[in-house]
Image (spheres, rainbow, N blue to C red):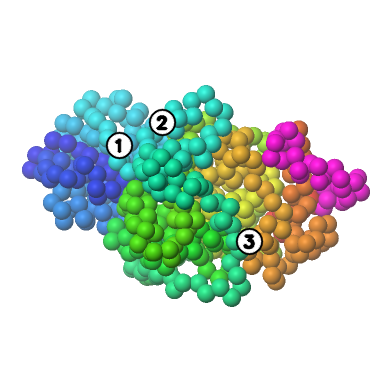
Amino acid sequence: MSIHTLRLILGDQLNAAHSWFQERDSGVLYLMAEMRQETDYARHHIQKVIGFFAAMRNFADELTNGGHQVRYVQLDDADNPQSLPELIDAELTRTGAARFEYQLPDEYRLDRILAIYCEGLDTEFGTATTEHFLTTRHELKDFFAGKKQYLMESFYRDMRKRFDLLMEGKKPLGGKWNYDAENRKKLPTKHALPEFLTLESDQREIAKMIANEGVSTIGNVDAERFAWPTDRAQSLQLLDWFLEHALPLFGTYQDAMSERHFSLYHSRISFSMNVKLLSPLEVVERAIERFEASEGEISLAQIEGFVRQIIGWREYMRGVYWAQMPGYASLNHFGHKRRLPVWYWSGDTKMACLKHAVSQSLDFAYAHHIQRLMVTGNFALLAGIDPDEVDAWYLGIYIDALEWVEITNTRGMSQYADGGIVGSKPYVSSGNYIHKMSDYCKGCSYDHKKKVTDDACPFNSLYWHFYHRHRARLEGHPRIGYAYRTWDKMGDEKQRALLAHAERTLSELDSL
């Protein structure tokens, strides 16, 4: 059989609806590979590596069953060069294909690897988009041309109008664009959570291969009962569960944190979306259909909050990434240089909120956006942790973390290392916010009300230390003036006590 075209499919390009696959051509060979180049550029969670490999293998099987020619290279294959350029070279030589094609990667790192490779390629080559996102790579940059800050809300409103989502003519359904103010409630103590859908697949073979090949990973896994979707059918099953059981209260409790369940009312479809088993437009359209059919059971605040996350925040973050890379990866607005505390890798800390958020991340490869922003991210920013270290942790520990979405959320929204391109201000808080939004503080070794005693919540003094040390940069910020007015009213003695306690805390980060 003569192969005239070799087409590369990356591990996050599992889009069965792509135009590539709509016609069968026996002269087209699809190339997919598991490789150390991808397992080793960051130290990933074991569930993340398993999830990618399992989803890739299932996708390759679906293509094969659909009549397509597929060359799938496993991690432990003897002829696997573990390098993308070397693999493509080998396949072009082996098949004699006259043309090479690939879908544009979503990560800058891979985009450069393939672009540079093709610059030196004698074979004819071509590229395609992934046909997944609602916007092009550079659309957001053009949208905000000439602006220092990229205001997500204006981009989100434009997306709503463009795709006619939750609209009444040219106006937003219900008269308001954004119901975020109604999406900030704590989970009541006796609140009955829905019965959660548990997905299970046996991935022991992949887990054993990863171990045998010596891939360094973090986190825990029950490979016999792997709990993440690894194909489109499971992804749709999880989406349907969310729409039926969690969407009715998603908006209300999307910021809530609790030890009672690791995902609460969140959809858990981010991994499926980021590897492109689900498309953003189909997800929001199915959600809006459920909202419209609910006859008032689902309020507008619930569906708007969900739609905003997907067509607003997700598309926005990708746009910021392509507008700002590669320089974005080295931004460090505050000049923070401290090392990440050791317990970020173990969960072994006396701070209940961080113990739970980190341990949950190690157990499930997942934490929702407020746990990431206002617990692990908040602490890292207050403590002055180097954004490079924070990036590496977030990129590795979460199953849905790909650089295009991770780095803009982490270095931008969470750490304000970009100086305000993404976030309108640094997102920091004392222990009071965590107490307000969670049940973590109950039984903690530290008291969220205390500030300078040995049992005082570390967040409290670190909060004021952060504002004190960065006063020159932040005092003139229109949304931060209240903090400095409060600080100035405290008096010298109280200020000195807070700063001294914070310094002690910073000197003992690993033992908190």
In which image quadrant can residue 190 be found? bottom right
Part of the protein shown in magenta? 473-501
The answer to which of marks 1 and 3 sits earlier in the sequence is 1
**Tag of residue 437:** 3
Residue type for callout 1: Thr
Name the secondary structure under disc 1.
Answer: loop
Q: Nearer the viewer, mark 3 or mark 2?
A: 3
The answer to which of marks 1 and 2 sits earlier in the sequence is 1
Quote the CA–CA distance across marks 1 and 3: 41 Å
Which residue bears the numbered disc 2? 138
Answer left or right for 457 relative to 400. right
Answer left or right for 292 relative to 59. right
Quote the CA–CA distance across marks 3 and 2: 36 Å
Which residue bears the numbered disc 1? 129
Pick the front one: 108 or 239: 239
Name the secondary structure under disc 2.
Answer: loop
Residue 331 is situated, as x and y percent measured from the top left of the image, at: 58, 34
Q: Nearer the viewer, mark 1 or mark 2?
A: 2
Answer left or right for 1 relative to 412. left
Residue type for callout 3: Met
Task: Assign the N terminus to one quadrant of the image.
Answer: top left
In which image quadrant can residue 151 be found? top right
Residue 424 is situated, as x and y percent measured from the top left of the image, at: 61, 39
The answer to which of marks 3 and 2 sits earlier in the sequence is 2
Residue 425 is situated, as x and y percent measured from the top left of the image, at: 64, 40
Query: Does the magenta-highlighted stretch encompass residue 163?
Result: no
Quote the CA–CA distance across marks 1 and 2: 13 Å
Is there any visible trace of residue 278 in the rendered image? yes
